[in-house]
Image (cartoon, rainbow, N blue to C red):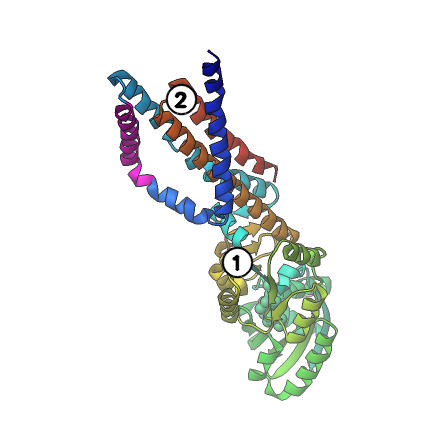
Amino acid sequence: MLENKTRAWVKPAILVVILIALIVLARILGLGERIGELRSWIEGLGIWGPFVFLVIYSVGVVAAVVFDLPGREAVHRGIAVLIVASPCALIIATPVAYLASVAAAARNGVLIKGGAHLESVARAVVVVFDKTGTLTTGRVRLTDVIPLGGADERGALRMAGAIEGSSNHPLAAAITRAVNEWGLTVPAVSQYESMPGEGARGVVDGRSVWVGRPERAHESAPGVQEDLRAHAERLRGEGKTVSAMTVDGSAVVFAFEDAPRERARDCVRQLRAQGITRIEMLTGDHNIVARGMAERIELDGYKAELLPQEKLEAVEQLRARFGSVVVVGDGINDAPALASADVGIAMGGGGADVAMEAADIILMNDRIENVAWLHRHARRTARIVAQNLCFAIGVITVLSVFAAMGSIPLPLAVIGHEGSTVLVALNALRLLRG
Ligand code: ADP
Ligand code: MG
């Protein structure tokens, strides 16, 4: 009698000890970090489902034969094994976590186009920011209009307004705002053409107008080159972004002020504290302006005066040197880099449509600090997925062994199986709190 009582608690105790041992073993083997591989392996099992079913059932039956059981009990044991070995908990371990995580992110204004991107964010080692419109507010203010060679300010602004009215670049928006503030009406533009990362051109009042990087102005206004360079250098020294307009050989210099987002430096610090090894800025703007910005928000490095294609190449170099790269950008000029990054994050409020299409994740409210939050959130999601997978595999293994040995009656098998599935789902739902 006493012996029977002792045996009644020994079996569950062994069960618990084995389960704990399995979880510890999973930690030691670093299963958490290898969870991606494990997950794809489990997903790959999908087509073998019916086959696996049969094998599991046979295990139960064979066990019954080995233990020399009567036919009825053999069938029961086979069913018990089949129930506890069914990988329900394992199958829902990842998707429920991703669903909860994506929902929590959406509530926080972060739109994730698929759960798998969370895994990439959690694995990232490099974060790369665009400057204008991403690290800065994009609420750019036009501060200087300097006509070179005869043109007047109002006329210059009208011309620029005509071209920039068709562009969605933050600098173009600043020109359009200034045009409205000055109460000017803009003439119509024809043959408009945008050159992402460089500028735009068109024909206004029958004259060919070009707006863009001052360094490119020599092509259409070689005469004012020296003057233009001197002005650009001085204004950039003040931390301003400079662009130029050329009309029939004469030129106008525009300077803009573009404040960094308030939380940009915080975000950079947090990302670093959370284990991102390299945080850089890639910009089409001039080197002097870029350096000022990089120092102000404490970046690890920057590359300036890049064309869209060069941003993409810079991302590929960073990936080759350090590893997985997250790109955060807002403009058409960022689209190639966003698309080639391991994860592309676009500004959803002020960003260009093309950027949002190329990106995997969109920050709906343009809050830069959400990049750091997203990284924390993705890490937490990965941890919970790892816990779930380890727990599910542990429970399934232990219960299967015991069921095959006949130590688990059918009702208990059902409770163990459903219980573990519910526990896995509940654990994943913790992510809903964000
Ligand atoms: P970022 O990479 O910082 O977002 P861009 O690549 O969009 O900057 O622009 C780089 C430079 O090209 C600007 O500093 C500006 O001189 C010029 N530029 C690009 N587009 C325009 C535009 N629509 N109007 C005026 N200047 C432009
Ligand atoms: Mg930009």
Residue 185 makes an appearance in the image:
no
Residue indicated by mark 2: 408
* Residue count near mark 2 (Cα–Cα under 10 Å), binned few <14, some 14–19, many ≥20: many
Quadrant of the snapshot with the C terminus? top right
Name the image quarter holding residue 304: bottom right
Q: Nearer the viewer, residue 74 or 353?
A: 74
Q: Position of residue 347 (x, y in %)?
A: 59, 55
Is residue 367 highlighted in magenta? no
Q: Residue at x 48, y 42 (%)?
A: 25
Q: Where 68 falls versus 317 (above or below)? A: above
Q: Position of residue 231 (x, y in %)?
A: 71, 80
Residue indicated by mark 1: 355
Q: Quadrant of ligand 1?
A: bottom right
Q: Nearer the viewer, residue 380 or 131?
A: 380
- The image shows a total of numbered marks equal to 2
Q: Position of residue 389 (x, y in %)?
A: 46, 39
Upstream in sequence: badge 2 or badge 1: 1
Q: Which residues are magenta?
A: 46-67
Secondary structure, mark 1, is helix
Whole-angstrom CA distance, mark 2 to mark 1, is 56 Å
Secondary structure, mark 2, is loop
* Residue count near mark 1 (Cα–Cα under 10 Å), binned few <14, some 14–19, many ≥20: many
Q: Position of residue 393 (x, y in %)?
A: 43, 36
65 to the left or right of 319: left
Residue 419 makes an appearance in the image:
yes
**Could you say which disc has been placed on residue 160 in the image?**
none
Q: Amino acid at mark 1?
A: Ala
Q: Where 376 falls versus 281 (above or below)? A: above
Question: Predominant secondary structure in magenta?
Answer: helix
- Residue positioned most to the top: 1
Q: Nearer the viewer, residue 389 or 252?
A: 389
Q: Does mark 2 have its CB less than 8 Å from ligand 2?
A: no
